[in-house]
Amino acid sequence: MPNFVYYPPQGPYLDILYQDDDIVVLNKPAGLLSVPGREKKNRDSLALRVLRIWPDACVVHRLDLATSGILVFAMRKSAQSHIGRQFQQKVIDKTYYARVEGVITKEEGLIDLPIRCDWENRPRQIVDFEQGKSSQTQWQVIKRDKQSTLVCLKPLTGRTHQLRVHMQALGHAIIGDDFYATVFGQQLSPERLALHAASITLTHPGTEQRITFNCPPPFANI
């Protein structure tokens, strides 16, 4: 992204949803990196802000710069390993909400399309049936209006830009998406990408109990 200029949001500095001895759960705003960028001017990130308060905290997963929503950090290495194994075993459930271009007529479905990096235009991703990695997304319509549809998305895999590429392939790109939306879709939400990580369910590394955290999307009343 040669024309990328980073203006990370400053308020609230940290939006903490939950914290104990093993994990801290935060709501990442759109426009803030999950982890520091390579260049010094792009260092500000949710991870760096967390480390300033909890120096032993560890990253366990990420969200795209443009995506808002729930991120979980481990408070110690043992918790990081515990949660990392859950991601590897695909036993962590995540739910996203997105507002997409146009009106989807069906109620729900499964997108099963392989994805790979578009190396000449990275970080863009593309569907590729020969070299792409297996990728699946469940979707369900929540609300419709005249120009867009609010959908609930559940990624069954965790590929880069998976939800964004899959919705574009369905013919209903996420509005506000600088990479995959049409000009019309970008104009519908010029201030941000309308994609939000709204919930996550995992096994708590301390109690071994399943626990769910929720954070409703700022762009929809649900």
Image: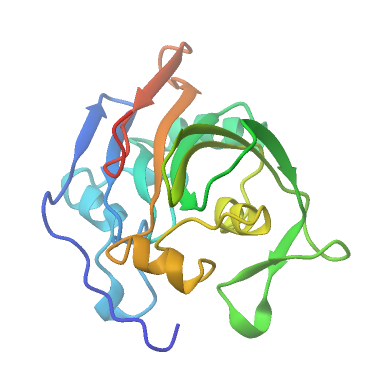
Frontmost residue, 98 versus 84:
98
Q: Is residue 34 above or below residue 42?
A: above
Report which quarter residue 126 is drawn in: bottom right
Apparent side of residue 33 relative to residue 171 in the rendered image (left or right): left
Q: Is residue 44 above or below residue 60?
A: below
Report which quarter residue 5 is drawn in: bottom left
Frontmost residue, 148 versus 50:
148
Q: Is residue 125 above or below residue 218?
A: below
Q: Residue furthest bottom?
A: 2
Residue 79 point in image, percent of width and height: 44, 30
Residue 149 visible from this viewpoint:
yes
Apparent side of residue 113 relative to residue 82 in the rendered image (left or right): right
Q: How is the image coloured?
A: rainbow
Residue 103 point in image, percent of width and height: 53, 46
Frontmost residue, 168 versus 208:
168
At x 58% / y 72%, what residue is drawn? 124
At x 21% / y 72%, what residue is drawn? 7
Q: How many numbered discs, if any?
A: 0
Identify the image quadrant of the C terminus. Answer: top left
Residue 62 visible from this viewpoint:
no
At x 66% / y 42%, what residue is drawn? 157
Report which quarter residue 215 is drawn in: top left
Frontmost residue, 199 versus 206:
199
Apparent side of residue 138 relative to residue 173 in the rendered image (left or right): right
Q: Residue furthest right?
A: 130
